[in-house]
Amino acid sequence: MNEITDYNGTIFENIKHIDENGCEYWEARELQKVLEYKEWRKFNNVIDKAMNACLCSENNVLDHFVRLDKMIQIAKGAKRKILDYKLTRYACYLIAQNGDSHIKSIALAQTYFAVQTRKMELTESKYKELSEDEKRLYTRKKVSEGNYSLNRTAINSGVKNLAEFHNAGYRGLYNGESADDIAKRKGLRYREYILDNMSSDELIANLFRISQTNQKLKNDNISNEVSANSTHYNMGRDIRNFIKSQGGTMPENLPTPERSLKQLEKEKREELIER
């Protein structure tokens, strides 16, 4: 891996995953590469130190370091089980703190995760206290960030028609509905964004679709538009099936909020002016 010469938080955001509950996590094997550890054995020693630090801080280690056993392909079609971990942002912070700060990427990670962990602590502690509209505003921002990253990945994967690419994802998640179909069902006016007219639960479902498609395109080295669109559709469909298996409400059946996020933001600006 080339040495990281400029600090940019996207190097860590690009390997971030979002689970079915909308919670972010990192995989240790991917973090190992970004932090420029060539051997898993040495990186695993750092993880052990981080776990001990987590324990000493009176945090539940299993909440932050979730063991994953993966099967990988080796020679002649055989498979071998390897150890991996699903890491919270706090776990990544502890790993960075226990790494060799003389390594440029480790120093960058220490700065990044220290700042971001604090931000997330504040966010998570207050999230349950937020109103539904505040949750929508917060999640919509995450969706925008996710779509920005997904667009870049899609283009690198050979996508030329981004509108059709995004429609493929919507069709998978919404049982065949395109973005226009969703807008019509919601009764939106021309040029109104459907994402601005979703509940927080509906936004979280879409955030999961966006994040997992982004990772799938990268992990599978997709390099043509047809495969990229198919990947997006299949991911949307798989998330839909998961929601169904859990007895959840299908996204098209979730209520459309009375006010769009654009309206809410306008009202907030007017309130500030009146003050």
Image (cartoon, helix red, strand yellow):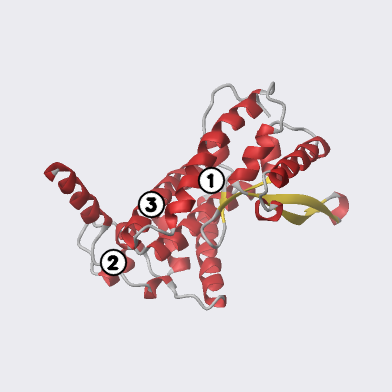
* Percent position of residue 191, x then y: 23, 55
Q: Considering only order in the chain, which callout, 3 or 2, is on the residue closer to the N terminus?
A: 3
Q: CA distance from mark 1 to mark 3?
A: 29 Å
Q: Is residue 75 visible?
A: yes
Identify the secondary structure beneath mark 1: loop
Q: Amino acid under label 3? A: Tyr
Is there any visible trace of residue 161 in the rendered image? no
Amino acid residing under circle 2: Pro
| Residue at 79% in and 53% down | 72
Residue occupied by mark 1: 157
* Residue position marked by numbered label 2 in the rendering: 257
Q: Residue at x 54, y 55 (%)?
A: 23
Residue at 48% in and 54% down: 210
Closer to the N terminus: mark 1 or mark 2?
A: 1
State the image quarter where residue 7 is shown: top right
Secondary structure beneath disc 2? loop
Label 2: how many residues lie within 10 Å, few (<14), some (14-19) or many (20+)?
some
| Secondary element at tag 3 | helix
Residue shown at 66% from the left, 34% from the top? 96
* Residue 234 vs residue 35, the one in the foreground: 35
Which label sits on residue 138? 3
Quadrant in which residue 201 is drawn: bottom left
Q: Where does residue 132 sit, x and y in percent of width and height?
A: 34, 62
Distance from disc 2 to disc 3, alpha carbons, whole Å, reads: 15 Å
Of discs 1 and 2, which sits in the foreground?
2
- In the displayed structure, 68 sits above or below 177; it is above
